[in-house]
Amino acid sequence: MRFNRTLLALAAFAAATVAHAADKPEGYLCCNMRSYGSEMSDINYDEEGMSIVPFGTPVKVAGQGPKKLRLLIGGKRHVLANDYSRDLGSARFTQRYVVAEDPRIAAAAFPDKIRDAIASARLTAGMTREQVLMSLGYPISSENPDLAANVWRYWRSSFDEIQVAFDAGGRVSEISADVLTRQQVWVP
């Protein structure tokens, strides 16, 4: 009887440990994210003083709530705020940004021009949706509920919108943006 209780206690502990590990995933950052110190947002603005945390950076989820994902990156605490994709639950939001497989492995097979565009958080003709995600991050779900849509909308700031147009094959055909934004984002 005592042996069975011990086995049950160990099984319960193992189940709790597995559940805890699932709640605190480790993986890689899906995409380039702009950071102001330790603060990031799903809108991924490109404002003065911001730096890029590159796609493929190893991350560990330290906690999550309805509006914030707390991450450990290189042992330092970061917060990724869910400012504009609140229709996504915490788990789904986390799964977007923390991926199990290192995206740099896939990127190694991309043509040089596309790899360079992604590394600089820019766009070029012929990129796939996956490559755009690596480069600019996810478009906010409040404005882009369907990732299969022919146009994705991004913002570099509150006033600088970028519309990324995909052709029938799912590759970037063009972007629409003001002249200055286009020069900063587009690789001809």
Image (cartoon, rainbow, N blue to C red):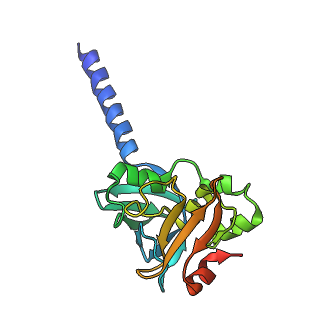
Determine whether, in the image, residue 93 is placed left or right of residue 176.
left
**x, y (%) of residue 170?**
62, 54
Q: Is residue 178 above or below residue 170?
A: below
Hey, which quadrant is residue 85 in on the image? bottom left
Determine whether, in the image, residue 101 is placed left or right of residue 79.
right
177 and 28: which one is in front? 177
Hey, which quadrant is residue 19 in on the image? top left
Q: Which quadrant holds the C terminus?
A: bottom right
Instruction: Identify the residue shown where x is 47% and y is 81%.
Output: 160
142 and 14: which one is in front? 142
Q: Is residue 148 above or below residue 154?
A: above
114 and 70: which one is in front? 114
Q: Which quadrant holds the N terminus?
A: top left
The total of numbered circles placed on residues is 0
89 and 170: which one is in front? 170
**x, y (%) of residue 151?**
53, 62
**x, y (%) of residue 120?**
63, 73
Which residue in the rendered view is the most extreme toward the top?
A: 1
Residue 54 visible? The answer is no
Instruction: Identify the residue shown where x is 55% and y is 60%.
Output: 133
Instruction: Identify the residue shown where x is 43% and y is 77%.
Output: 37
Residue 24 visible? The answer is yes
**x, y (%) of residue 115?**
70, 65
